Amino acid sequence: MTIRGGGGPRDASEPGRRREPMARPLGEVPPASAGSHRSEPSYGAEPSHGEPPRRTEPSNRAEPSYRAEPSHLAEPSSREEPARPPSGHAPTSRSGRGSATRRAGTVSAYDVARQRPRSGVGGLLRFAVFAGVASVLVLLLLATVLRPVTRGLVVGLADSNPGALGIPFVADFVREDLGSALTDPASDDPTVVDFTIESGETAAGIAARLVEAGLLRDERAFLLVAMERNLTGSLSAGDFLVRRNLTPDELVGTLLEARDPAVTIQFRTGLRLEQMTAYLEARPDEIATLQMKAADFLELVRNPPVSLLADHPWLDLPKGASLEGTLAAGAYRVLPDAGPVELVRMMLDRFGEQLGTARLGAIKDAKKSLHEVLSFASLVERETPLDDERALVAGVYQNRLDQGMLLQADPTVIWGVDTLELDKLTLARWPEYSFWNVPSAPLASIDFPAPIAGYQ
């Protein structure tokens, strides 16, 4: 390889003397072998006799070129030797700095500069490709071999900071960790319970209380669904009816979207079972979405199953008796898909609370059954609406019973007349019927068939 530069390093053995350079300018002959080597003059200048050949200096003073002296120290040039110019013409330097002597095996500063690697757009592209490949490899590693560790770290982050569930990859890890808790209800029990959202309560607070109430298996399931629906920022306070077997998605829809589908069934005091049935069949606006069939309700209250009676042992009904008089009046909020059993249980539970253990004890002490007492009380209540008169009316009826007389009570006759008239109508026409109207004929002249002869 051709080397550029000044004279070589100084000889340490002789102070002040320079060692012979490994390469000398073209045309310069080493002193020890000047006679044994043929000198080659530079193009464009003839050497004078008796003087060592000299190289023609360019006008802009280009750096001198050197030739490698020992052939085994010089690297072969990859460039082809340029063609010699015609006699009398000096070659022009490629750098444009004037003419200069060129010879095979020499390299100029311009050539060295051209061969240096350049960092440009290509280098940036290569680095970007490398970085992309490295990132993919890291992600694959995290998603396979290190996935359990990564999931544990991410899930722990979500537990301490629920807001992180809004980050897609965090949500994916938490969804995987939740498993069936994200889609399955906390219970198979279809019982309806009341749940209240207080003013200013957060979604995280609601989720925690749902877990405490046994309505949710994992708080994160509720929060994850809520964040996916963007419902965590706008919560409505109020009372809601929720079933214990709702999924997290259904809980979010009911509580956070304020889609309380509950309907309110209002039964006033003094209604007989057929009047309640007629109300359910009429489907007024307040219960228009109720899916319960009135016929199913009527069948249940007329012929209560053993399982229902067993859950309310205080009823102590005689065989074949209906639930007449044991269903408490009032308002009942139920879901549209509520069945007759659910509604009747609610009514029996409320009546049992109103009755209380004290009254049940008094009835037992009087050696009466609850059915007897309720039948007697309903007659007195229908006979007079005034509380001051009811004690007097009750005394009259009790005296007749003690003497073995017929009660001769107007309410029993009217009740029998309504029963016969309803038998003539289809259930769809019951809402049109007017109950408890006094017949135009004298009550004593009305005869009842055998099944209801006792009401005469």
Image (cartoon, helix red, strand yellow):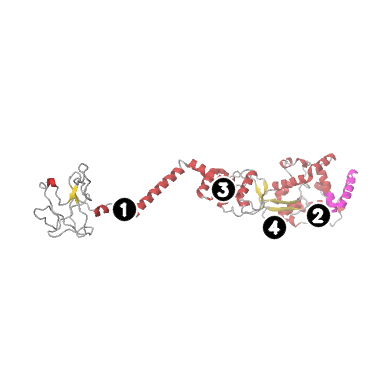
Q: Earlier in the sequence, mark 3 or mark 4?
A: 3
Contact, CB < 8 Å: mark 1 with mark 4?
no
- The region drawn magenta spans 378-406
Viewer-closest of 71 and 168: 71
Q: Which residue is mark 4?
A: 285
> How much space separates mark 2 and mark 4, taking CA atoms?
25 Å
Element type where label 1 sits in the image: loop
Question: Label 1 crowding class (10 Å Cα cut-off): few <14, some 14-19, many 20+?
Answer: few
Quadrant of the image occupied by residue 191:
top right
Q: Is residue 136 visible?
A: yes
Q: Nearer the viewer, mark 1 or mark 3?
A: 1
Q: Nearer the viewer, mark 2 or mark 4?
A: 4
What amino acid is found at the position of numbered circle 4 in the picture? Asp
Q: Earlier in the sequence, mark 3 or mark 2?
A: 3
What amino acid is found at the position of numbered circle 3 in the picture? Pro
> How much space separates mark 1 and mark 3, taking CA atoms?
51 Å
Q: Earlier in the sequence, mark 1 or mark 4?
A: 1
> How much space separates mark 3 and mark 4, taking CA atoms?
42 Å
- Name the chief secondary structure element in magenta: helix
Q: Is residue 426 visible?
A: no
Q: Which residue is mark 3?
A: 162
Element type where label 4 sits in the image: helix
Q: Which residue is mark 1?
A: 118
Outermost residue to the left: 49
Q: Nearer the viewer, mark 1 or mark 4?
A: 1
Q: Earlier in the sequence, mark 1 or mark 3?
A: 1
Q: Residue at x 10, y 55 (%)?
A: 48
Q: Residue at x 15, y 51 (%)?
A: 28
Q: Nearer the viewer, mark 3 or mark 4?
A: 3
Q: Nearer the viewer, mark 3 or mark 2?
A: 3
Q: Residue at x 56, y 51 (%)?
A: 227
